[in-house]
Image (spheres, rainbow, N blue to C red):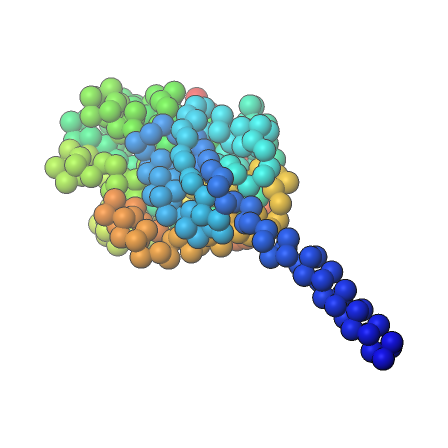
Amino acid sequence: MAQRLLRLFLVTAIGVLFIVGVRPALAQEPFYKGKTIHIIVGFAAGGGYDAYARVIGRHMGKYIPGNPSIVVENMAGAGSLIAANHIYKAAKPDGLAFAHFSGGLFFQELLGQQGIQFESRRFEHIGAPFQDNFMMGFSKASGITSMEKWIASKTPVKIGGQAPGAANEDLPKILKAILGLPIQLVSGYKGSADIRLAVNGGEVAGICNAWESFKSTWRKELESEEVVIVLQLIPKAHPDLPNVPLAINYAKTDEARKLIQVAVHDYGTLARPLVLPPGTPKDRLQILRKAFLDTLNDPEFQAEAKKAQLDISAVPGEELGKIVNNVFKLDPALVAKWKQALSAK
């Protein structure tokens, strides 16, 4: 009898200890419950990056355990370099802030641009919502309505840009250096929204922009044919623009074609990264990566993106990180040619 009572006591005691030990784990709330995530956009409100960030922010919270609130903050300046430096140096690596800036800054680190205070390969990559298809578009009023008219221009054609690292600045520089196109870059705009106003007001003739941003933020100008796409900076013609010529077809040497492939075509894949600060806990990184991909597959998100004419073609975070790492393995001779093209006046 005594032994039976002892066994019963031990079983009861172990059960109590198990319940006491497990209950806190079962009752533990998700990290993100009651919290707010900040998406820091490196460009002014009203542009393509801002549009993507806001539609993602409106839907992503429901796929994160704890259903946090998500707000978008614009930190424009220096072609989004200010935002990139901020997320790397100043933001806490706690999974409560990530940035959306120009992936061209990854290339700028490789090329030695001054002012970069981050190491691209140390960012934690959530993913990218789309691989950009860059185009050159001009106002009808500028008279540049075809490549023939652009090439024949006797004076440099003014193109609006932001700063080194932004596609609207770097890609025209490549075109000028490699293809010899008459270009006068007018730099210093805060975002594509400001450049759109400059184009509409006749301050500049055109812009290098993603077709996806043209369709979503320049819709009225395209529909009225006040803005005309004259050149595509992608490997093959976009289905929407089958008759618009490709930049690579104007390259006259193998070296020029290779540089366009690396510095222009590959640029589009990395153009729109969403990144966390280095050192963000891996479990939170995985939560956000999964939530990001689930968001892009969400029917309500897709309907809103379609209405806003935002094309979606996800680049998962793991793949984005691999591509960034490969950028830093390029042939040094090609990197030198690239750097020379961007530094030319």
| Residue visible at 58% across and 28% down in the picture | 90
- Residue 6 location, quadrant: bottom right
Residue 315 visible? The answer is: no
Residue at far front of view: 1
Using residue 256 as the reference point, say whether residue 154 is left or right of it.
Answer: left
Foreground: 140 or 120?
120
Q: Where is residue 218 in the image (x, y as percent from the top left)?
A: 23, 36
Query: Above or below — where is 308 with respect to 85?
Result: below
Q: Position of residue 117 (x, y in %)?
A: 59, 27
Q: Position of residue 106 (x, y in %)?
A: 53, 37
Foreground: 163 or 337?
163
| Residue visible at 71% across and 62% down in the picture | 16
Residue 268 visible? The answer is: yes
Using residue 112 as the reference point, say whether residue 75 is left or right of it.
Answer: left
Residue at far bottom of view: 1
Foreground: 96 or 269?
96
Query: Above or below — where is 141 with respect to 338?
Result: above
Q: Where does the N terminus fall, quadrant-wise?
A: bottom right
Residue at far right of view: 2
| Residue visible at 59% across and 46% down in the picture | 325
Using residue 15 as the reference point, say whether residue 102 is left or right of it.
Answer: left
| Residue visible at 29% across and 37% down in the picture | 136
